[in-house]
Image (tube, coloured by chain):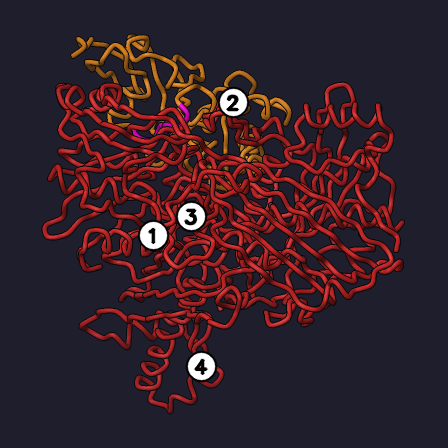
């Protein structure tokens, strides 16, 4: 065959438009006659809306529409991926800082902006909860009206759901050493550089919606259901998102913009400010108590985990992140008895949602920090403790779920080798290591269509969103190899539900596996037609024809697919069409509704320097190794791994949303909320991957885009401990927090010791 | 309504005459009045660098400069980097190293890098980190972006 494309790192498909400015994100799309929308919200966490007077706003020249809840169908329609709890606009009460209760549509952005300031709202600020303790207080105000949660025994509390997992008998387990601690993870926000953008336009007898959405087909269902339209009358355009990271998975303000467009009879566009994106999406904060029991030789005996996640005022997909993140919270270890309790706790804050790692980074921060403390308490090397307890390939480490699907020890050993674990770190530096495991998708459905055109060029139709992970390139590489086309003869069409077949979602690092397999099957469908064609042309029995990786083999003779195609199509030309479907059905008996399609596994090892005068932590070396099964495009794998690693350094060292005493976000926007810049990089970044072709995707690939973020925080905190002797159990490890911890430790020398070690 | 003011500026080598609102930024003028949407809008407070353009060869956050201040200036946006079909060496290098992931920050990164190389044709890695510190990338493709700038410098990007 010709040189394979899969496994190489060709230039990104779609890359040229990204470096020339031609790539059109939602905000770059201009529709004639469009109205510009702006949101109206209150500067408080929770309020009872008494009256809304829109007359002055409507009087602004150019203003065409001031939409409030009263202009919507009654009761105000609600939506959400897990619970139908989020209103299109707040009605009666606002539940978090920045929740929109009205929206303006005007001929110009200026007019819309001016009108937002003229909507007169009479309101009464109400008591709000925005911490875990505050929300769990028996006297706390309820975030959600119990009427929204009929038949729910927890409806009269702020606990949305409580999840219980585990096996064995934790209480009966007898351990030589028990290590426990509580570990806090802050609220952080996705901060995609592209603020979310939405456009809706009446479209003959239906509606068209443009959104920076990760899941266009899911959005199509939401809009169709709210507008009582058949799916076929709702067309979602999903241009490549300018970064998603989970924050763009589910509908936010698309329903509002759709109602506005229908009411105005004109296209309406809403592009959020960065500040508004902070008030639209975030990661759940958590406090997780971990109690681990060990034999004195280091063998894990039990794990007991109680996790409280602070989610926002509406569920969005947050409870699923809690369920999925806590289900695997024991980690990649062999433990005879495990008990996990996890709660999703509602609060008057920004609705939390999916964010790279999906509930796992919080758990991994807690459990891997606990593992490091245990290693110190047991007098066992932290690397050795991990290797001793790590599940072997094929081992059923979570009873009833997919067995360990990788040689994880190899990944850990590779990271240890790269950082030089056996040799002491440079003087003044500390070293830390941690592992991260995440369950991949539990269900999935990806349809695809591949067309092999008369000249041998190819069009692939895939409903995945290419938000930077490079899905378009991977799909083109697969089709190029399977159908024998040069990569630049392959076009990948995405982002239009009227054209592209169904894809469930772009999340959980699934697309290379699910859509990749679907496209592989569509190519095989075409290969079967080529095979029949070749047999007819020859003529030979079909059994004598092999079609594989772009070639047709009959006996010892090898012909490119294209040559058979051109002859076989004959004078009429035309094309061959292949259809692919990759499906993973739900398993209703499974606690998550399905087993893991694969596990993402990463080991991170770091070396840090801590400035005792300022508390500043410098990551001198950062090693990240992921088990990827097969790197279909090594440069993209490296980009995802190193990007995830640096994003992980964000919540580890600097990022956290801060609320004031009234529940308002105080660090709204780029000046006060810091994410890593080019000056915050590790002094040396080394990434590598393990390829054992043991994944369920094409050519043995696994999903891999989240792994390198999972365990950054515990690795860094372990290194800080190694360097200073001080244990910090709250994130981020900001200079102030580290400085205070160092000073507290200097004042009371026991402060750095593990919190609770019982030798029984 | 505010009185609009006529300004004349050179954008990507072409003289443009446009009536702008006095409170509109250069970013507004480029995106909304001239339809040059390659320059991106994110933080609007000069922190993210997505809107970086060259104004008289200096890298500027176009969200922090009023359109009227650009009267008489020469502005280069991402649309002006390539010469016809021939990409600028920085654009080539960004593609070669895989620096453009989601792509949203890339126009700003490219122009910040162009300004850097104009002043320092062969920067050290530290100088590249410093020179691009005002351009956020949430894909955090910083390693690849820095590599691209170094590769482009080696290819003589500053001479093009």
Q: Secondary structure at mark 1?
A: loop
Among numbered discs 3 and 4, the one appearing first in the sequence: 3
What residue appears at the point 69 percent right and 43 percent down from the top-left corner?
Answer: A182
Colour given to chain A in the rendered image: red
Q: Nearer the viewer, residue A465 or A63?
A: A63
Q: CA distance from mark 2 to mark 3?
A: 27 Å
Alpha carbon separation for disc pair 3 and 4: 52 Å
Residue at 73% over, 23% down: A739
- Tag 3–tag 4 contact (CB < 8 Å): no
Q: Chain of mark 2?
A: A
Instruction: Give the colour in which the image draws chain B.
Output: orange
Task: Work out whether disc 1 and disc 2 sit on a shared chain.
Answer: yes
Earlier sequence position, callout 2 versus callout 3: 3
* Whole-percent x, y for residue A228 in the image: 18, 55
Question: Pointer 1: what residue?
Answer: A84
Residue range highlighted in magenta: B37-43
The structure residue drawn at horizontal position 42% and vertical position 54%, both measured from the top left corner, is A506
Chain for mark 3? A
Q: Which residue is mark 2?
A: A672
Frontmost residue, A620 versus B96: A620
CB-based contact (under 8 Å), mark 2 and mark 3: no
């Amino acid at each position: 065959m010709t040189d394979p494309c899969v496994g190489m790192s060709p230039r990104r498909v779609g890359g040229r438009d990204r470096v020339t400015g031609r790539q059109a994100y939602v905000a770059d799309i201009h529709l004639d006659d469009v109205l510009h929308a702006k949101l109206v919200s209150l500067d408080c966490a929770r309020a009872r809306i008494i009256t809304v007077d829109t007359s002055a706003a409507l009087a602004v020249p150019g203003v065409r529409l001031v939409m409030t809840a009263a202009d919507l169908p009654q009761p105000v329609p609600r939506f959400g991926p897990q619970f139908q709890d989020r209103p299109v606009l707040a009605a009666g009460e606002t539940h978090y800082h920045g929740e929109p209760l009205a929206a303006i549509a005007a001929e110009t952005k200026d007019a819309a902006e001016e009108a937002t300031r003229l909507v007169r709202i009479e309101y009464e600020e109400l008591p709000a909860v925005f911490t875990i303790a505050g929300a769990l207080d028996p006297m706390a105000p309820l975030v959600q009206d119990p009427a929204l949660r009929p038949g729910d025994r927890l409806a009269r509390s702020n606990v949305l759901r409580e999840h219980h997992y585990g096996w064995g008998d934790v209480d009966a387990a007898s351990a030589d050493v028990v290590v426990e601690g509580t570990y806090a993870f802050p609220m952080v926000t996705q901060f995609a550089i592209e603020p979310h953008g939405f456009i809706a336009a009446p479209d003959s007898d239906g509606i068209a919606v443009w959104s920076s959405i990760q899941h266009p087909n899911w959005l199509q269902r939401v809009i169709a259901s709210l507008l009582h339209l058949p799916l076929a009358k709702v067309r979602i355009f999903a241009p490549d998102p300018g970064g998603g990271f989970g924050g763009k998975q589910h509908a936010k303000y698309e329903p509002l913009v759709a109602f506005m467009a229908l009411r105005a009879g004109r296209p309406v566009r809403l592009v959020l400010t960065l500040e508004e994106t902070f008030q639209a999406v975030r990661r759940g904060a958590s406090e997780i108590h971990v109690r681990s029991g060990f034999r004195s030789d280091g063998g894990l005996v039990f794990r007991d985990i109680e996790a409280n996640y602070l989610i926002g005022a509406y569920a969005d997909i947050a409870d699923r992140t809690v369920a999925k993140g806590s289900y695997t919270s024991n980690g990649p270890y062999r433990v005879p008895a495990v008990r996990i309790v996890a709660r999703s706790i509602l609060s008057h804050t920004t609705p939390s949602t999916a964010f790279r790692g999906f509930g796992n980074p919080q758990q991994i921060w807690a459990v891997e920090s606990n593992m490091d403390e245990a290693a110190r308490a047991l007098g066992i090397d932290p690397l050795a403790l991990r290797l001793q307890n790590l599940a072997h390939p094929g081992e059923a480490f979570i009873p009833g779920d997919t067995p360990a699907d990788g040689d994880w020890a190899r990944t850990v050993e590779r990271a240890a080798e790269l950082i030089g674990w056996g040799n002491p770190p440079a003087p003044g530096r500390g070293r830390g290591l941690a592992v991260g495991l995440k369950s991949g998708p539990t269900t999935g459905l990806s349809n695809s269509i591949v067309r092999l055109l008369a000249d041998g060029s190819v069009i692939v139709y895939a409903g995945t969103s290419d938000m930077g992970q490079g899905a378009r390139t991977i799909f083109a590489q697969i089709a190029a190899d399977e159908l024998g086309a040069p990569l630049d003869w392959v076009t990948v069409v995405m982002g239009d539900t009227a054209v592209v077949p169904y894809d469930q979602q772009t999340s959980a690092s699934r697309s290379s596996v699910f859509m990749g397999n679907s496209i592989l099957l569509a190519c095989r469908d075409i290969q079967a037609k080529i095979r029949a064609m070749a047999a007819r042309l020859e003529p030979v029995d079909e059994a004598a024809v092999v079609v594989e990786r772009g070639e047709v083999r009959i006996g010892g003779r090898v012909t490119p697919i294209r040559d058979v195609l051109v002859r076989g199509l004959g004078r009429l030309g035309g094309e061959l069409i292949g259809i692919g479907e990759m499906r993973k059905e739900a398993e209703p008996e499974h606690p998550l509704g399905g087993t893991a399609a694969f596990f993402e596994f990463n080991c991170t090892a770091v070396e840090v320097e801590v400035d005792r005068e300022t508390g500043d932590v410098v990551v001198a070396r950062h090693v990240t190794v992921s088990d990827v099964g097969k790197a279909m495009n090594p440069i993209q794998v490296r980009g995802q791994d190193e990007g995830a690693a640096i994003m992980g350094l964000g919540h580890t060292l600097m990022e956290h949303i801060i609320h004031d005493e009234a529940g308002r976000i105080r660090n709204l926007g780029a000046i006060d909320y810091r994410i890593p810049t080019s000056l915050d990089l590790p002094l040396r970044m080394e990434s590598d991957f393990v390829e054992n072709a043991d994944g369920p995707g094409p050519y043995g690939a696994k999903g891999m885009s989240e792994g390198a973020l999972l365990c950054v925080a515990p690795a860094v905190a372990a290194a800080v401990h190694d360097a200073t002797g001080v244990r910090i159990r709250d994130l981020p490890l900001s200079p102030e927090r580290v400085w205070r911890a160092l000073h507290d430790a200097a004042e009371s020398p026991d402060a750095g010791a593990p919190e609770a070690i019982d030798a029984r | 309504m505010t009185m609009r003011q006529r300004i004349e500026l050179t954008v990507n080598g072409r003289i443009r005459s446009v009536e702008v609102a006095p409170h509109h930024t250069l970013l507004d003028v480029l995106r909304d009045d001239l339809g040059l949407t390659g320059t991106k809008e994110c933080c609007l407070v000069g922190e993210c660098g997505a809107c970086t353009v060259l104004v008289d060869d200096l890298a500027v956050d176009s969200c922090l400069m009023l359109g009227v201040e650009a009267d008489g200036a020469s502005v280069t946006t991402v649309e002006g980097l390539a010469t016809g079909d021939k990409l600028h060496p920085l654009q080539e290098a960004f593609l070669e190293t895989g620096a453009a992931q989601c792509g949203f920050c890339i126009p700003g990164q490219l122009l910040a890098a162009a300004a850097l190389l104009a002043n320092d044709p062969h920067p050290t890695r530290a100088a590249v980190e410093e020179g691009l510190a005002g351009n956020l990338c949430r894909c955090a493709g910083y390693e690849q972006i820095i590599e691209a700038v170094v590769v482009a410098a080696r290819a003589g990007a500053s001479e093009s």
